[in-house]
Image: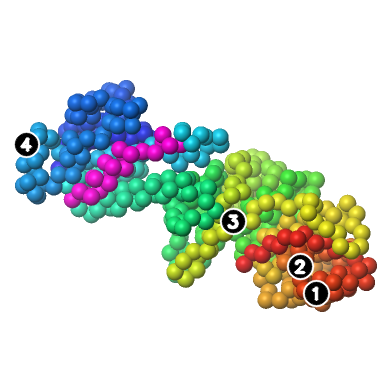
């Protein structure tokens, strides 16, 4: 039976309805200051906490529920006579349900320009204490910390007259996970000034269950890191299509990262988390055509990212393609109508305008551990780059920087061939760099691209002259690479002898 409930929640979503439902079931309500005021505004009476403690809120609200009359009422075990006797001795009535919502530390601390003092004031003390106490005593007290649980709790109370032990156990697990995530967010904020602290404790919250993982026999879900300024699906609306799969999301992340490299109208076609075709143009329509035609075979079943709204003309054309996922910042009504004729195409509307966090770290799971590194997020420009041989016009420089940005997002060993701001051949994931060059050249030729005057980007230094020689013989006129190999002089000499140009970036972009 639930006879008495304690309510104290910052987030008032659904709280009045929940409290009203409890009251209809005959439950006596006790609430902390702000929560009691909120309930009163909705015509729901609740005893203020200070009537129990006989002490008003202190220290600007820092102390209100930290009191034996509160915590004894939560922690008392109903099957321990000594506990019940102690309650009787002090005139304390036990709680059967505790509903808590913490101060929004993560949201406040993540705001631009927030002061340390303001963030610290959002560290909840009383809320986690009450929730942990209720979770510890879950056999007798139901700990509630999510508005999502309010309807199902009321439904079970109405049907059974109480909450089952399984429900209490699930609520306790959720409560401890919630307090752990909250403390993790605070600890991470304090440790954020350290590059790599001794104890690394990221926290993630589930966004969605997925139908399966990379393969049908693998279970899967998508989690977002708590405290992150934005995540893969933040402010993204799915306006049509099947549920996003594990592989869709992995490809979508790759596509969104790459399209974010460009300010001009750009289109990115991704397959298996690798760019298949990328182009920048004066219009989004032209950008798509060139990105698709870069490698039309690989574009079949693409994940497509666009950085401009989809016009009616483009929407009709996209509807004729096999597209797994398309994401854009807007869609013409006629474009949506055309795209929605394909029942499986997942159409995503990107409303996210916040910039990503350049300090965001990358994680890679390894056996029994986690590799953690700074993210490779900076967008490279010509500053710090060195033209080590030949000459490069502004147009060639534009192609070199375009290919270099794309190269950062292809699997290493990565080679990108580009011409007039369009990829024409991409070789990645090979165990030797010359094989990647060979693959990129073969792809370009296979799809009818003219390599004369094209540029080549290599994500890491070129160890031997064989790769550049192969590209130069095919028509490549300029190469951009980090430099730093033992045989740099030989490589530069080969390029110079062939009349080509070479740029050293002095920075590499491995992506394994």
Alpha-carbon span between mark 1 and mark 3 = 29 Å
Image location (x, y in percent) of residue 245: 51, 59
Q: Which residue is mark 3?
A: 374
Alpha-carbon span between mark 3 and mark 4 = 58 Å
Q: Which mark is residue 461?
A: none
Q: Earlier in the sequence, mark 3 or mark 2?
A: 3
Left or right, 77 with respect to 192, comes to: left
User: What's the magenta bit mostly, secondary-structure-wise?
Assistant: helix
**Which residue occupies 62% across, 62% down?**
273
Q: Which residue is mark 2?
A: 484
Q: Residues within 10 Å of mark 1 (few under 14, many from 20)?
A: some
Magenta region? 119-139
Instruction: Kindly indicate the quadrant of the structure image that contains residue 466.
Output: bottom right
**Which residue occupies 21% across, 31% down?**
29
For the question of whether residue 165 can be seen, the reply is yes
Alpha-carbon span between mark 1 and mark 4 = 86 Å
Element marked by disc 2: loop
Image location (x, y in percent) of residue 497: 93, 72
Q: Earlier in the sequence, mark 3 or mark 4?
A: 4
Element marked by disc 3: strand
Element marked by disc 4: helix
Is-magenta flag for residue 124?
yes
**Which residue occupies 80% across, 45% down?**
282
Is-magenta flag for residue 351?
no
- Say which of 484 and 410 sits in front: 484
Instruction: Kindly indicate the quadrant of the structure image that contains residue 512.
Output: bottom right
Alpha-carbon span between mark 2 and mark 1 = 8 Å
Element marked by disc 1: loop
Q: Which residue is mark 4?
A: 89
């Amino acid at each position: 039976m639930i006879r008495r409930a304690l309510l104290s929640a910052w987030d008032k979503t659904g709280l009045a309805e929940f409290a009203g439902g409890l009251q209809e079931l005959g439950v006596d309500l006790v609430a902390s200051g702000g929560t009691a005021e909120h309930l009163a505004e909705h015509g729901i009476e609740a005893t203020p906490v200070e009537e129990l403690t006989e002490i008003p809120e202190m220290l600007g609200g820092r102390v209100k529920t930290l009191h034996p009359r509160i915590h004894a009422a939560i922690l008392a075990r109903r099957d321990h006579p000594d506990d019940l006797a102690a309650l009787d001795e002090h005139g304390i009535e036990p709680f059967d349900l505790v509903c808590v919502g913490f101060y929004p530390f993560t949201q406040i601390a993540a705001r631009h320009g927030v002061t340390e003092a303001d963030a610290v004031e959002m560290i909840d003390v009383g809320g986690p204490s009450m929730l942990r106490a209720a979770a510890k005593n879950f056999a007798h007290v139901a700990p509630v910390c999510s508005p999502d649980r309010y309807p199902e709790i009321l439904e079970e109370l109405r049907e059974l007259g109480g909450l089952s032990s399984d429900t209490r156990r699930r609520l306790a697990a959720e409560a401890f996970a919630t307090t752990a995530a909250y403390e993790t967010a605070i600890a991470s904020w304090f440790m954020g000034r350290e590059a790599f602290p001794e104890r690394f404790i990221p926290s993630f919250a589930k966004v969605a269950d997925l139908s399966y993982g990379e393969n049908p026999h693998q279970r899967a879900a998508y989690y977002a890191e708590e405290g992150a300024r934005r995540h893969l699906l933040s402010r993204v609306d799915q306006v049509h299509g099947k549920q996003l799969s594990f592989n869709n999301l992995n490809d979508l992340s790759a596509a969104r990262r790459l399209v974010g490299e460009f300010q001009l109208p750009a289109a990115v076609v991704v397959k298996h988390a690798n760019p298949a075709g990328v182009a920048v143009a004066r219009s989004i329509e032209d950008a798509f055509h060139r990105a698709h035609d870069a490698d039309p075979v690989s574009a079949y079943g693409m994940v497509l990212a666009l950085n401009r709204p989809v016009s009616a003309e483009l929407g009709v054309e996209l509807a004729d393609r096999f597209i797994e996922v398309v994401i854009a910042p807007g869609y013409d009504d006629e474009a949506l109508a055309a795209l929605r004729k394909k029942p499986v195409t997942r159409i995503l509307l990107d409303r996210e305008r916040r910039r990503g966090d350049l300090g965001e770290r990358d994680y890679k799971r390894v056996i029994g551990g986690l590799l953690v590194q700074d993210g490779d997020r900076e967008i490279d420009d010509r500053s710090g780059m060195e033209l080590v041989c030949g000459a490069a016009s502004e147009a060639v420089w534009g192609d070199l920087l375009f290919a270099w940005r794309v190269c950062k997002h292809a699997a290493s060993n990565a080679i990108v061939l580009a011409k007039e701001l369009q990829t024409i051949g991409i070789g990645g994931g090979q165990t030797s760099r010359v094989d990647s060059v060979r693959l990129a050249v073969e792809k370009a030729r296979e799809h009818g691209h003219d390599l004369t005057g094209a540029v080549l980007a290599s994500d890491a230094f070129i160890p031997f002259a064989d790769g550049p020689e192969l590209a130069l013989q095919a028509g490549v006129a300029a190469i951009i690479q980090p430099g730093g190999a033992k045989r740099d002089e030989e490589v530069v000499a080969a390029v110079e002898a062939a009349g080509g140009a070479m740029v050293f970036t002095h920075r590499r972009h491995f992506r394994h």
